[in-house]
Image (tube, grey):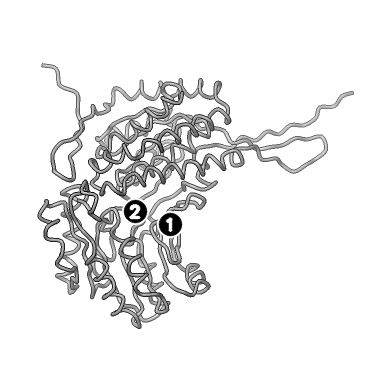
């Protein structure tokens, strides 16, 4: 009897029941997939100049935005975020795409060399070819647009490998692009759950660049798979992002912002606030204010329209989050979470309540590792210097935030923080005009901003000398 095709199954984080299946990419399908992309690249390069590519992207973004409210349900179903927040992700992705569209003409234009009589010199940015985009489930539209839009504008073809948890998102984007006239195979979707198959795809000649968004372990595996090839590998990995509350801050306002930055999307953001340091002069007042804010949150059915938090992505994730919490409690931490989440927790094991932990320290995993859940550990500090030292005591460095009325001091302290982005009085917000980049084990390379095109182009120099006429 012939063996059946391998199938990927998406399990609902809400009900724990299957909701989607997709045929899985197999190793023997990889050559045809890559060859189709290579052939499409040659035709796309010949038929679509930058202006034509810009027109395609602009139309696709308009169409995607018009469907945002209808597409929100898919996001809630596949990753559990409350439905009232999901259209916002799609609309934010469109705004990011439009920013990159706006700067693309300037970014991708030729750069002239110095003037010299008898010579013409310039640098051109040319497409690489086929880009493999491997992206996570937690903000799939936002993560995808970070690579897809600049790579497409630069003239590349793409193979999109989504998380098995959110299989419909690249399919939706591909359908939108095809509706506005994108040629066949310029963008393809490959559903792949096998690490070995993915490693084979990365190692295949014809894949000219890889971008990966996900865990540190996944990023290292991607890097290892590409190790025998000379291709760019962009990595956007985890975060253990700290916040520091200075004594001059408006306590009630800061508490609301910190809770939102820590537990929005059930804390499942690479740049969510994972640990909070509070100056001893305002520590007790701040903790009380955080408890009051959390008391107003609702954990519940993400389709209800009234829940602030839904389930986390999986049983495995819920177990990991609770293990971090339980270890901290055994080590002397104390939970101050108000007793208002029992109804939500009764919906299932993946419905993890927001947890406020005090009496924490850096011997605990909840402070040293990425928990990736709705947990707010709060540690008292005695000075700015102690706060900065603790903020930097991590092997991850994606973002960090400082909360103060004194902007000048906040900016000065930011210079000592080891992170790709440092906010003052804000958190959990990748701005499209700034480079999204990680320090330490949080990654390498960058997306967004004018620098977000760099990993999708190569430089070609033209050096022209006037020949003698006699």
Residue 183 image position (x, y, % from top left): 45, 22
Q: Residue at x 24, y 59 (%)?
A: 374
Q: How many marks?
A: 2
Q: Residue at x 74, y 43 (%)?
A: 114
Task: Give residue 237's mark.
Answer: none
Quarter assignment of residue 123: top right
Indicate whether 375 appears above or below 33. Answer: below
CA separation, marks 2 and 1? 13 Å
Instruction: Please state, as top left, top right, bottom left or bottom right, where the N terminus lies in the image.
Output: top left
Residue 66 image position (x, y, % from top left): 40, 36
Quarter assignment of residue 324: bottom left
User: Which residue is nearer to you in this view: 171 or 328?
Assistant: 171
- Helix, strand or loop at label 1? It is strand
Residue 154 image position (x, y, % from top left): 53, 34
- Helix, strand or loop at label 2? It is loop
Quarter assignment of residue 70: top left
User: Which residue is nearer to you in this view: 413 or 344?
Assistant: 344
Residue 10 image position (x, y, % from top left): 20, 37
Residue occupied by mark 2: 270
Judge the density around disc 2: few (<14), some (14-19), many (≥20) Cα neighbours within 10 Å.
many
Dot in front, 2 or 1? 2
In this picture, residue 75 sits left or right of residue 41: left
| Mark before the other along the chain sequence, 2 or 1 | 2
In this picture, residue 238 sits left or right of residue 451: left
User: Which residue is nearer to you in this view: 321 or 197?
Assistant: 321
Which residue is outermost to the right? 470
Indicate whether 125 appears above or below 333. Answer: above
Instruction: Please state, as top left, top right, bottom left or bottom right, where the C terminus lies in the image.
Output: top right
Q: Are marks 2 and 1 in contact (CB under 8 Å)?
A: no
Residue occupied by mark 1: 439
Which residue is outermost to the front? 305
In this picture, residue 470 sits left or right of residue 400: right
């Amino acid at each position: 009897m012939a063996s059946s095709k391998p199938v990927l199954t998406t399990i609902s984080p809400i009900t724990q029941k299957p909701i989607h299946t997709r045929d899985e990419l197999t190793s023997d399908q990889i050559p045809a997939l890559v060859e189709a992309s290579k052939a499409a690249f040659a035709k796309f390069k010949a038929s679509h100049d930058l202006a034509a590519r810009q027109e395609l992207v602009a139309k696709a973004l308009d169409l995607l935005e018009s469907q945002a409210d209808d597409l929100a349900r898919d996001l809630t179903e596949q990753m559990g975020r409350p439905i009232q927040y999901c259209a916002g992700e799609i609309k934010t992705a469109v705004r990011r795409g439009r920013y990159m569209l706006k700067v693309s003409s300037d970014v991708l234009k030729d750069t002239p060399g110095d003037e010299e009589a008898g010579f013409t010199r310039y640098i051109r940015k040319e497409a690489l070819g086929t880009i493999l985009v491997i992206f996570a489930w937690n903000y799939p539209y936002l993560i995808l647009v970070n690579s897809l839009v600049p790579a497409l504008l630069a003239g590349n073809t793409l193979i999109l490998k989504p998380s098995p948890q959110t299989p419909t998102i690249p399919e939706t984007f591909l359908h939108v692009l095809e509706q506005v006239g994108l040629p066949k195979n310029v963008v393809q979707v490959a559903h792949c759950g096998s690490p070995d198959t993915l490693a084979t795809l990365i190692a295949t000649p014809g894949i000219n660049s890889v971008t990966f968004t996900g865990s540190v372990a996944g990023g290292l595996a991607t890097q290892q798979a590409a190790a025998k090839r000379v291709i760019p590998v962009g990595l956007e990995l985890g975060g253990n992002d700290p916040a520091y509350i200075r004594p001059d801050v408006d306590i009630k306002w800061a508490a609301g912002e910190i809770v939102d930055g820590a537990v929005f999307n059930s804390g499942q953001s690479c740049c969510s606030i994972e640990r909070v340091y509070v100056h001893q002069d305002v520590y007790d007042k701040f903790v009380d204010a955080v408890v009051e804010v959390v008391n107003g949150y609702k954990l519940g059915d993400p389709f209800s329209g009234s829940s602030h938090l839904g389930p986390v992505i999986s049983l495995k994730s819920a177990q990991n989050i609770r293990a971090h919490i339980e270890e901290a409690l055994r080590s002397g931490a104390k939970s101050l979470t108000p007793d208002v989440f029992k109804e939500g927790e009764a919906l299932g094991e993946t419905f993890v309540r927001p947890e406020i932990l005090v009496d924490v320290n850096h011997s605990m995993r909840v402070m040293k590792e990425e928990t990736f859940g709705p947990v707010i550990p709060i540690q008292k500090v005695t000075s700015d210097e102690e706060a900065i030292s603790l903020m930097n005591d991590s092997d991850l460095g994606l973002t960090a935030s400082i909360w103060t009325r004194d902007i000048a001091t906040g900016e000065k302290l930011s210079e000592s923080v080891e992170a790709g982005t440092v906010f003052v009085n804000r958190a959990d917000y990748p701005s499209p005009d700034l480079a999204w980049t990680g320090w330490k084990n949080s990654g390498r390379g960058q997306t967004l901003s004018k620098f977000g095109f760099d990993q999708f182009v190569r430089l070609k120099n033209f050096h022209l000398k006037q020949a003698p006429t006699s």
